[in-house]
Amino acid sequence: MFAWFGGATNAIAEIVALAGGRDASGVRADGATSCVDVLRLGETGGRGSMTSPFPHGPALLLLVWSAWLVMGENDTDHHSDTHRISAGSKHCGEYSSQATADGKCRLTATLPQLDEQRCPDMFRCTDEVSYWLHENEERKQQILALKETISEMQEELRNHRHRIKVLELQSEEKNGLNSSLEMRFRELERHYAETGMLLHLQGSLIYDMQTQIHNLSVLVERVRRNPGCMINIVRTSPLMSEQEALHPEVQHVRNCPIDCASIYYNGVRRSGIYTVVPSLGAMPVEVFCDMDTESGGWTVIQRRQDGTVNFDRGWREYKDGFGDLHTEFWLGNEHIHDLSSQGDYTLRIDLEDWNGKHKHALRKLQVGLGYCAISAIIEEEANQYRLHVSGFSGTVEDSFSWYHNKQSFSTPDMDNICAQISHGGWWYNQCFYANLNGVYYKGGRYSPKGQTPLGPNGIVWYTWKDSDYYSLKKVSMMIRPRTFRPRLSP
């Protein structure tokens, strides 16, 4: 029977140390105890058992007998002692010790079969040794299991690393694909921007073409309205008259009507919109021709009838004109000047109140300082389109010529308090007796509530209603040459 026990290595080491350097009597020269004496020391223990010189007692002296037997066969014997193991009168076996050549001790024990015999206490630790051997075996199994687990985990780790590598490669491929897609997307964005620019350019071209088509349509309509009228742009030349030479670039006009009276003389008898070319202005302008009132031939320069057009405008708009020739409008001071400066003209003003009553006034009109077209055009705007009227006849008392003659035209943006109060452009004196471009009020009598600055500002003809606070329903202003003579329709 043999068993390993905790601390055996230390015991062997001490045995080896004690076994070296002995003489024939088994005692070392330095007085230390030999391997045989160590074993004998074990016999002096209590209860007839071996008492170990080691701190762990008899249990630590128990060795693996078979292991030492094997080793003993290969070693050279130097000294051997045999001892019996007894328990009183009982014989429990024997053991022997032997010192080997390498300085170690070999311990051999022989245990006979005993029936109900009590062996010395030195074999009492056999069960404990067996327990630790069993525990050691379990630990070995656990270590083997752990090694297998570690091996499996290492294999799994290798698999994970492989998968990570595959994923990294896939990620690199995806990144490359994403980069390619991003480049493609940017290229598409660039193409989209170029396409947008082309579309915008095409839209501009289409708009320009539509404008040109519209202008051509207007020209065709003008030609239809004025057959035989030719307008050509020519450059200055020595053959031009002195008056024409003042223009670096003029329009040469042939057979074109200069006003609605000319259109009337051309045989047109229907009221409507026509194109005329004032002889001095030389710029075509569309006008509304009244061919019904008093034999026709009237060029309408202003109309108020329903309040659809706001007449609270600035100087520039009153100069160029605004509104709709079919309804309410102001022809424009520049055009009125060009037309009226061609000769002596009569101004006709038609009035209508909210009861349906009509009045009119006639007077000789000259808008401008003189008849010289070249100098008058410059001076007229510089002198704020000063009004010249004389003579009066009609079915209503005069509220216009006597008070507004030789007055300059003013608008609300020209710092004229009367224009600001009236909210319109007009030939104001110290405000007005007649104000045909004022605010349109429905119903006649009005109160300018909420207006700033506060004062009368309606469409007023004071001598008809004896009030600045009665606004007329309809008014119109139109001009015709004083020399006009009606003709029979062709």
Image (tube, rainbow, N blue to C red):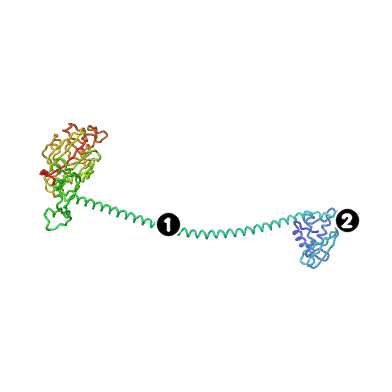
Pointer 1 or 2: first along the chain? 2
From this view, report whether residue 74 is shown above or below residue 243. below
In this rendering, the label closer to the viewer, 1 or 2: 1
Q: Position of residue 460 (x, y in %)?
A: 19, 35
Where, by quadrant of the figure, is residue 366 drawn?
top left
Residue type highlighted by circle 2: Lys
Placement of 240 over or under 405, stated as above or below: below
Q: Is 184 displayed left or right of 399 in the figure?
A: right
Disc 1 residue crowd, few under 14, some 14–19, many 20+, Cα 10 Å: few
Residue assigned mark 1 = 185
Left or right: residue 202 compared with residue 461:
right
Query: Tag 2, which secondary structure?
Result: strand
Identify residue type, mark 1.
Answer: Phe
Relative image position of residue 101 (x, y in whole percent):
78, 67
Q: Is residue 483 above or below residue 101?
A: above
Q: Residue furthest right?
A: 89
User: Front-most of 220 and 403?
Assistant: 220
Badge 1 marks a residue whose secondary structure is helix
Residue position marked by numbered label 2 in the rendering: 90
